[in-house]
Image: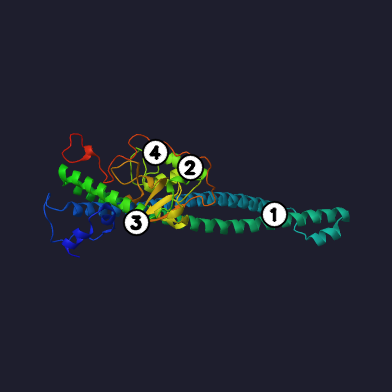
Amino acid sequence: MSGTLLRWVCTGAALGALCTTAPPAHAAPGPGERPVAELLTDLQRLYRSAEETSETYNATEEKLKEQRARSAGLDRRLAKARASVRDSRGDVGRFARQQYQGTSTLSPYLRLLLARDPQRALDQGRVIRRVAAERAATMRRLVGGEKKADDLAGAAKRALAAQAALAARQKKQRDEVDGRLRDVEELLSSLTVDELAALRQAEEAGTAEAQRKFLASGALGGSPANRPPSRQGGTALDYAVRQIGRPYKWGAEGPEAFDCSGLTQRAWAHAGREIPRTSQEQWAELRRIPLTKLRPGDLVVYFPKATHVAMYLGDGKVVQAPRPGSRVKVSPIAANPVLGAVRPDPGGRAMHGYTPPKLPAGATSGSDLGYGRTQAPGATDSR
C-alpha cells in the first residue's frame, strides 16, 4: 500500500484504528512534516499493539495464579501423605517389635490342642486373627501411602515446572508491553505542542463522525436510552461510574487503578458475578447479545481480536478505562471499532423504575490519546 493511499484511507479515528500497516520505510519525514492522520494512525496502532500484549499478559497472570494455587494444593496433599506414611511406618515397626519379643512360635492350631482351656484359646485365636488383619491393613496402607506420596511428589514437581514456565512467559510479556509503551512515549515526545493539539482534534473529530454514523445506522435499535439494566447490571454500572477519574494502568484490577478488563471484571465482581479477567475471555465465555438488545451494565467488546472492553452506560455511551496515560471516563460507544457485546447475567430481569447513575463533573473530559495537557512536550508540569 503506497504512503499516499495509506494517508487517504486512515483519515478518522475509527478507520485509523483499523489500519495496521505502517508507513513505508522510505517515507521518513521529520517532525512537523508528517500528516496528522498518519501520526494518528501510528499512535493508535502502537496503543492497540500495547493493549493486545497487555491482555495476553493478563491471561498469563490468571493462569499463573491458578497454577500457584494448584502447586500449593499439591504441596499440602503431599505433606499429608508423607505424614500418613510416617505413621504407617511407625505402626509396622511396633508390630515387628512385638513379633520379635513374642514368647511362642506355635501355630494357633497347636496352641488349641495343647491348651488347658480350649474356649479361651479360641477367644485368643480370634484376637490374634483380628490383630493380624490390622497388621495386614497397616502394611497395605504403608504401601499405598508410599505410592501416593511418590505420585504426588511427581505431580508437585511438574506443577512447579509449569509455574516457572508461566512466570518466565509473564516476564517476557511484561517486557513486551513496556517496550510498546516506550514506542508510544517516543512518538509523543517527538511531537510539538501544536502537533499534539492537532492529533487531539483529529481524533475527536473522527470519533464524533464515527459515533454519528454508528447511531444513524440503527445499530442500537430503537429507544436505546430507555432500556433499564438488571439489578446486578445496575450495581456493576454504579461501581464503574464511581471509578471515573481513576488512572489507567495496564494489568491493574483496582481499586486505585484499572486497565480496561480489570474495570469490567471488578465492577461485576462488586455486583456478585465473577467474570473472566481478560477482554478476550469475556468475549469468548460470556453470553453474546445483539447490539439492539444492549442495556446498561452489558459489556461492549472492541477490535477484531477482542482486545478492548467497556461497560455500556446507556444512550450510546460507555464507561471505560481507555489506555495508558488516560483515566476512567465516559466515551461514545463508537470511540473504537465495535466487535460486539456480551451480557454477564443473561438471566437477569430488567429493573423497574431505573434511574441512571449521576455522572461526576468532567466524566467525558480527557483525551483518548493517552496524555493530558500537562503531559505534552514543552509543558511546564510534565509527568
Location of mark 1 (residue): 99
Residue 8 position (above or below residue 36): below
Mark 3 and mark 4 lie on one chain; the one further toward the N terminus is 4
Location of mark 2 (residue): 234
Callout 4, which amino acid?
Gln
Q: Which image quarter holds the C terminus?
A: top left
Mark 4 and mark 2 lie on one chain; the one further toward the N terminus is 2
Q: How is the image coloured?
A: rainbow
- Few, some or many C-alpha atoms within 10 Å of disc 2 (few <14, some 14-19, many ≥20)? many
Asked whether the residues under the numbered discs 1 and 2 touch, taking CB atoms below 8 Å apart as contact, a structural biologist would say no
Mark 1 and mark 4 lie on one chain; the one further toward the N terminus is 1
Asked whether the residues under the numbered discs 3 and 1 touch, taking CB atoms below 8 Å apart as contact, a structural biologist would say no
Q: Mark number for residue 289?
A: none
Location of mark 3 (residue): 303
Residue 186 at x, y = what percent? Answer: 19, 48
Residue 330 position (above or below residue 10): above
Mark 3 and mark 1 lie on one chain; the one further toward the N terminus is 1
